[in-house]
């Protein structure tokens, strides 16, 4: 028997769908608090020394956290080539905006303290804000567009034509998803600052986190209502589909239908745990921010990120990129993956290297853990950001 045939092709597809979700959630959890902190920087810290304190809570680890972004993109490229090709082509300008904004972050970290001039440092503070707020917003907008369906079509040779525009991405529903993303990450970043700082900064972070978590609850509930009520049409497969089929999105029939994104919850009620955990995480963050249970608050903010992103995944399954103008061309878990051998080889590599990344990340955070305050910055001025 050929080694990769030990695992059924359909099982490998499911494993990689789950792994893709894990990588996206890990990126939102790990780099999410970096973006949340950066988005609050000009507001949560009033003086230069306070801003240096805030920056130094994420400065030593933000580069490692972005590994999850690279892993997520790499997984899409290798495991779901049609998804990578269509999404990165269709969202090209949006991706360019995100990458341009994210480039500002490392530059801001490195150059901010090179000169003592207040205007110089203020400019880099706002650059760091832009490099954090814009990706948080655009990633949420992208998720909103995926739920609505992306305007692409495939011809008989599976050549893609994208009929959307950059400004067409910013519909009311997608903007709602973008604001939910910002609120979720700001709440997550606020909890991080509560854990890592003291005094006025921690107090302001609690206020920001309380507002962000409350806003997140409202936006998540509103988005759920729009999906459940049929205002946002979902997608449904109407033909038989072979889970072991080779990649060919056109080998099925699909339709748009109001309330279709709720179908999985009807068939598998246990999936209600996903939105339930999202609400529980946000509500727990909102309430616990009024206490001193710092590590418990962080657990709930991570739970909110997990629940909200998982809700999108389980609502859409098996769709991963629906087409709003040619539903039959929509990409699903079953018809848009790499070959059986490729998925197996990637799984072997992942099982080797992912635990190493997790252990190393845990070790780094253990070594660098502790409160950051003004005294720490002044004492370590030569190494602090």
Image: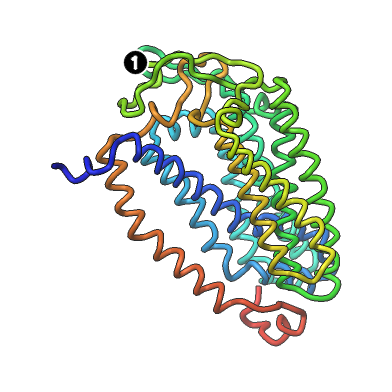
- Please name the residue shown 80% across and 67% down the image: 118
State the image coordinates of residue 4 (x, y, percent, origin top left).
22, 43
The quadrant of the image that shows the C terminus is bottom right
State the image coordinates of residue 163 (x, y, percent, origin top left).
55, 18
The quadrant of the image that shows the N terminus is top left
14 vs 160: above or below: below
- Please name the residue shown 19% across and 46% down the image: 3
What secondary structure is marked by label 1?
A: loop
253 vs 8: above or below: above
Q: Quadrant of residue 9?
A: top left
Which residue corresponds to mark 1? 157
Q: Crowding near pointer 1: few (<14 within 10 Å), some, many (20+)? A: few
106 vs 269: above or below: below
State the image coordinates of residue 316 (x, y, percent, origin top left).
55, 30
Comparing 150 with 18, the one in front is 18
State the image coordinates of residue 267 (x, y, percent, origin top left).
56, 28
Q: Quadrant of residue 6?
A: top left
């Amino acid at each position: 028997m050929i080694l990769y045939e030990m695992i059924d092709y359909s099982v490998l597809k499911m494993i990689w769908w789950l792994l893709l979700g894990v990588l996206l959630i890990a990126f939102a959890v790990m780099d999410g608090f970096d973006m949340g902190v950066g988005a609050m920087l000009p507001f949560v810290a009033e003086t230069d020394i306070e801003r240096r304190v805030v920056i130094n809570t994420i400065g030593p680890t933000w580069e490692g956290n972005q590994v999850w972004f690279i892993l997520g993109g790499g997984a899409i490229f290798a495991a779901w080539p049609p998804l990578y090709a269509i999404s990165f082509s269709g969202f090209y300008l949006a991706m360019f905006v995100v990458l341009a904004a994210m480039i500002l972050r490392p530059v801001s970290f490195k150059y901010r303290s090179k000169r003592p001039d207040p205007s110089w440092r203020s400019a880099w503070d706002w650059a760091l804000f832009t490099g954090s707020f814009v990706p948080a917003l655009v990633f949420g907008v992208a998720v909103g567009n995926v739920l609505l369906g992306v305007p692409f079509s495939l011809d008989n040779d599976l050549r893609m034509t994208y009929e959307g525009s950059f400004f067409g991405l910013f519909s009311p529903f997608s903007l709602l998803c973008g604001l939910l993303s910002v609120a979720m990450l700001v709440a997550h970043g606020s909890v991080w600052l509560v854990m890592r700082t003291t005094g006025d900064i921690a107090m302001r972070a609690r206020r920001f986190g309380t507002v962000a978590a409350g806003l997140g609850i409202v936006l998540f509930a509103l988005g759920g209502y729009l999906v459940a009520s049929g205002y946002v049409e979902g997608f449904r497969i109407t033909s038989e589909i072979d889970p072991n089929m080779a990649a060919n999105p056109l080998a099925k029939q699909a339709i748009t239908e109001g309330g279709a994104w709720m179908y999985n919850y009807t068939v598998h009620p246990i999936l209600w745990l996903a939105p339930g955990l999202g609400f529980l995480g946000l509500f727990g963050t909102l309430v616990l921010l009024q206490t001193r249970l710092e590590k418990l608050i962080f657990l709930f903010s991570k739970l909110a990120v997990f629940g909200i992103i998982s809700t999108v995944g389980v609502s859409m399954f098996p769709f991963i990129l629906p087409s709003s103008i040619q539903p039959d061309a929509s990409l699903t878990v079953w018809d848009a993956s790499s070959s059986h051998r490729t998925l197996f080889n990637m799984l072997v590599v992942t099982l080797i290297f992912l635990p190493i990344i997790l252990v190393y990340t845990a070790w780094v955070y253990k070594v660098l853990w502790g409160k950051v305050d003004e005294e720490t910055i002044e004492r370590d001025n030569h190494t602090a950001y």
